[in-house]
């Protein structure tokens, strides 16, 4: 391991004693918790899944790092909070990262460099990315012990600012920035199903319908009888998407933009609600269900109106659905509003795992990055799901988990017959770490 030869920092003395600070410790790492993520990755082989979709064009005799190792190193870097590929220069000799890539922390060869990572990210073409998207859906389906009776899929998009001349970049007047606006799909429990890079504009009905059609086809290949419920904002509730859902037998709940015709259906409800609020002085929320057919729709559909009057004034919103059983209040508050949780999933993927680090020139390379960040998301989601059910860790954010479970200092010594990792005796998460290692341990051979 490379040791620092720079000048020692000068610290304020304590009780008249000078404090010396060095960066020349033994084989140590500040990311010892990567061993937990290593257990997750070994079980699911996400790096192998991505690598299987790529064609390695290098001369075999000159290959020092397999595609699988390069991808695994990049995923581990992202999961540990090193979203910049340049960090590979300092991390390639880190004993915890070498251990995570099945190399000896001392005797093992150094990991790949930043240029090697960049070449890997630019290796994928359109066909390879399509294969990866299908494999990610297959991986999603395999994450269930058995085919579920029903799943809920939340469609959303998020703005991704760019600072260069990347392919597909587009100026968005709302954000006053150039960027991308990828479509991201999570299921109701937070599993990432897919992400597609696209320009920074609202998806059209045809574009959204095409994306949904491909996604559902891939899921149906594995689960032909599973009931699927789609949820999304009003810009996904287009005539093309609604007709597609009806033709594919999908259930749906989408937001619906206001217009004068819709307001006519709730005028009396708005007036009576406002009157009650004036008399009682408390916030009121009421619902109304009715049939409605926009001029662009192929048929009448069920619409739920939510009328709310409070100190800030009147607020009326609409949703459209083909669900017939639940009452309007339950459908809006328990089913449709629950899609707001998708914002937290996007936060974990984007803010905590830096999926908006799409700074490559080629669109295919940036889509590849979304895949790699998606794999890092799966590592953390799986680790969080392994936490005790009634503990706060089961709902913790990824950055909180990373701070408490990965950012751990440890001495790692490779001996002749074993590798010894020594963490501080004062480590505050000892109990949780032991529980997670037990939960993630591979099954004992019969």
Image (cartoon, rainbow, N blue to C red):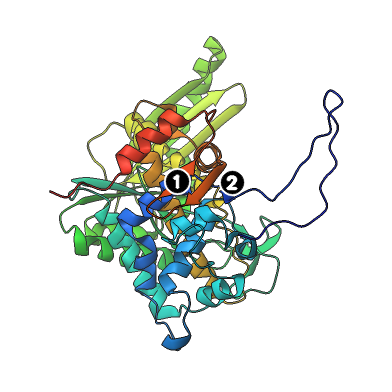
Q: State left or right for residue 127 relative to residue 28.
A: left
As drawn, the label of residue 30 is 2
Q: Name the residue under label 1.
A: 420
Q: What x and y, as percent, mark residue 69?
A: 44, 68
Q: What element carries label 1?
A: strand
Give the residue at x 59% y 46%: 30
Q: What x and y, as percent, mark residue 423?
A: 51, 38
> Which residue occupies the foreground of this view, 41 or 269?
41
* Residue 21 lies in quadrant: top right
Name above or below for residue 140 compared with residue 284. Answer: below
Mark closer to the observer (2, 1): 1
Work out whether mark 2 precedes mark 1 in sequence or the reverse, and give the earlier one.
Answer: 2
Q: Is mark 2 on a helix, strand or loop?
A: loop
> Which residue occupies the foreground of this view, 409 or 248?
409
Distance between the alpha carbons at the discs numbered 2 and 1: 15 Å
Give the residue at x 51% y 43%: 406
Q: State left or right for residue 64 relative to residue 212.
A: right
Specify few, some or many for label 2: CA neighbours under 10 Å numbering under 14, 14-19, or 20 or more: some
Q: State left or right for residue 253 relative to residue 411.
A: left
As drawn, the label of residue 191 is none
Name of the residue lying farthest toward the left: 446
**Does residue 190 show up?**
no
Name above or below for residue 254 compared with residue 297. Answer: above
Q: What x and y, as percent, mark residue 80?
A: 54, 50
Specify few, some or many for label 1: CA neighbours under 10 Å numbering under 14, 14-19, or 20 or more: few
User: How many marks are shown on the rendered structure?
Assistant: 2
Name above or below for residue 289 compared with residue 365. Answer: above
Q: What x and y, as percent, mark residue 264?
A: 45, 39
**Does residue 420 show up?**
yes
Give the residue at x 44% y 56%: 100
> Which residue occupies the foreground of this view, 339 or 221?
221
């Amino acid at each position: 391991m490379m040791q620092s030869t720079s000048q020692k920092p000068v610290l304020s003395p304590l009780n008249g004693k000078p404090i010396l600070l060095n960066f020349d410790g033994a084989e140590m790492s500040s990311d010892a918790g990567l061993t937990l993520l290593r257990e997750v990755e070994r079980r699911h082989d996400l790096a192998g899944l991505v690598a299987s979709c790529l064609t390695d064009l290098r001369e075999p005799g000159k290959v020092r790092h397999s595609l699988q190792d390069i991808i695994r190193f990049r995923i581990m870097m992202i999961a540990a909070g090193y979203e910049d590929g340049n960090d590979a220069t300092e991390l390639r000799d880190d004993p915890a990262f070498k251990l995570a890539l099945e190399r000896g922390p001392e005797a093992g060869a150094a990991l790949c460099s930043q240029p090697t990572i960049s070449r890997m990210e630019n290796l994928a073409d359109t066909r390879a990315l399509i294969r990866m998207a299908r494999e990610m859906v297959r991986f999603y389906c395999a994450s269930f012990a058995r085919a579920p009776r029903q799943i809920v899929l939340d469609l959303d998009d998020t703005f991704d600012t760019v600072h260069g001349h990347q392919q597909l970049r587009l100026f968005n007047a709302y954000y006053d920035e150039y960027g991308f606006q990828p479509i991201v799909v999570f299921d109701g429990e937070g599993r990432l199903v897919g992400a597609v890079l696209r320009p920074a504009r609202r998806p059209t009905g045809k574009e959204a319908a095409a994306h949904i059609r491909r996604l559902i086809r891939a899921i149906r290949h594995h689960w032909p009888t599973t009931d699927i419920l789609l949820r999304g904002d009003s810009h996904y509730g287009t005539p093309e998407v609604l007709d597609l859902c009806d033709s594919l037998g999908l259930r749906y709940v989408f937001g619906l933009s206001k217009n004068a015709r819709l307001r006519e259906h709730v005028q009396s409800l708005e007036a009576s609600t406002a009157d009650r609020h004036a008399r009682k002085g408390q916030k009121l929320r009421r619902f109304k269900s009715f049939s409605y057919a926009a001029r662009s729709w192929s048929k009448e559909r069920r619409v739920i109106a939510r009328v709310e009057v409070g100190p800030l004034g009147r607020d009326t919103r609409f949703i459209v659905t083909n669900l017939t059983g639940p009452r309007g209040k339950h459908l809006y508050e328990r089913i449709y509003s629950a899609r707001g949780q998708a914002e937290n999933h996007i936060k974990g993927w984007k803010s905590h795992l830096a999926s908006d680090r799409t700074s490559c020139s080629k669109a295919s390379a940036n889509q590849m990055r979304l895949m790699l960040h998606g794999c890092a998301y799966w590592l953390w989601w799986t680790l969080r799901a392994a936490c005790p059910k009634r503990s706060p860790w089961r709902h913790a954010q990824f950055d909180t988990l990373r701070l408490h479970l990965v950012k751990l200092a440890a001495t790692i010594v490779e001996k002749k017959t074993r590798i010894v990792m020594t963490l501080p005796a004062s480590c505050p998460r000892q109990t949780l770490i032991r529980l997670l290692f037990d939960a993630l341990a591979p099954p004992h051979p019969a």
